[in-house]
Image (cartoon, grey):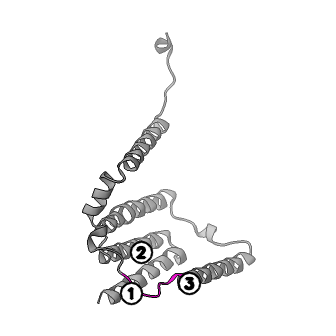
Amino acid sequence: MTLILFAILAFIALVGGLGVVLSRNPVYSALSLLMNFASIAIIYFLLNAQFLGVVQVAVYAGAIVVLFLFVVMLIGGNIGSLRHSSRPLARVVAVVLVATFLLTVIWIVIQTLPLSTTSAGPPEAGSVQAVGAALYTDYLVPFELASLLLLVGMLGGVVLARRYKPLTEDETS
């Protein structure tokens, strides 16, 4: 049953990915992206990786798609003039490059497939408790350095976005 559900979700993820790339309307493209992210989150839940599933929903399906839609609405969503290329050979070159890439990926996957099926690990390996325990024991220093880096980036963004007003004569003396 799990294999059938995985196949259905993988198909939905592929359809969503194709919808992102092939859709001419940026809003439909964002909705296809949301469908892709949601199906991948459910796949994470099937693999007992609850933390990754929740992060997938919160960060990608929530924040990234909303940001994408905000930018599309901000710029007006008119990208029709960008879609038409004045180079007739560009589409042929793109199809050849994509086909080469896909064939290379398929060849690598076939070469690296395991001969026997083995377990991916204990069911609790991707749980929230296991990820939290690993973050706060084995990876505490990199975790804190990443939080410090994010804090510095946030402060830098605030400083860059702040509007400066020129000093008056009373303030300079």
| Crowd rating for badge 2 (residues with CA inside 10 Å; few <14, some 14–19, many 20+) | many
Name which residue type carries label 2.
Answer: Asn
| Crowd rating for badge 3 (residues with CA inside 10 Å; few <14, some 14–19, many 20+) | few
On the image, the x and y values in percent for residue 155 come to: 43, 38
Question: Relative to the observer, which residue lies in front, 104 or 154?
Answer: 104
Q: Are marks 1 and 2 in contact (CB under 8 Å)?
A: no
Looking at the image, the residue that sits furthest to the left is: 129
On the image, the x and y values in percent for residue 10 come to: 41, 82
Residue 81 in magenta stretch = no
Disc nearest the viewer among 1 and 3: 3
- Which badge, 1 or 2, comes first in the chain's sequence? 1
Determine whether the residue tagged by mark 2 lies in a helix, strand or loop. helix
| Crowd rating for badge 1 (residues with CA inside 10 Å; few <14, some 14–19, many 20+) | few
Taking the spot 39% from the left edge, 64% from the top edge, the residue there is 60
Counting the numbered discs, the total is 3
Disc 1 designates what residue?
Answer: 7
Disc 2 designates what residue?
Answer: 36
* Left or right placement of residue 28 versus residue 41 in this view: right
- Which badge, 3 or 2, comes first in the chain's sequence? 2
Determine whether the residue tagged by mark 1 lies in a helix, strand or loop. helix
Name which residue type carries label 3.
Answer: Gln
Vertically, is 143 above or below 88?
Answer: above
Residues shaded magenta = 112-118
- Which badge, 1 or 3, comes first in the chain's sequence? 1
User: What secondary structure do most residues of the magenta stretch adopt?
Assistant: loop
Question: Relative to the observer, which residue lies in front, 88 or 94?
Answer: 94
Looking at the image, the residue that sits furthest to the top is: 173
Per the model, the C-alpha gap separating discs 3 and 2 is: 27 Å
Residue 117 in magenta stretch = yes
Taking the spot 30% from the left edge, 78% from the top edge, the residue there is 46
Name which residue type carries label 1.
Answer: Ala
Disc 3 designates what residue?
Answer: 111
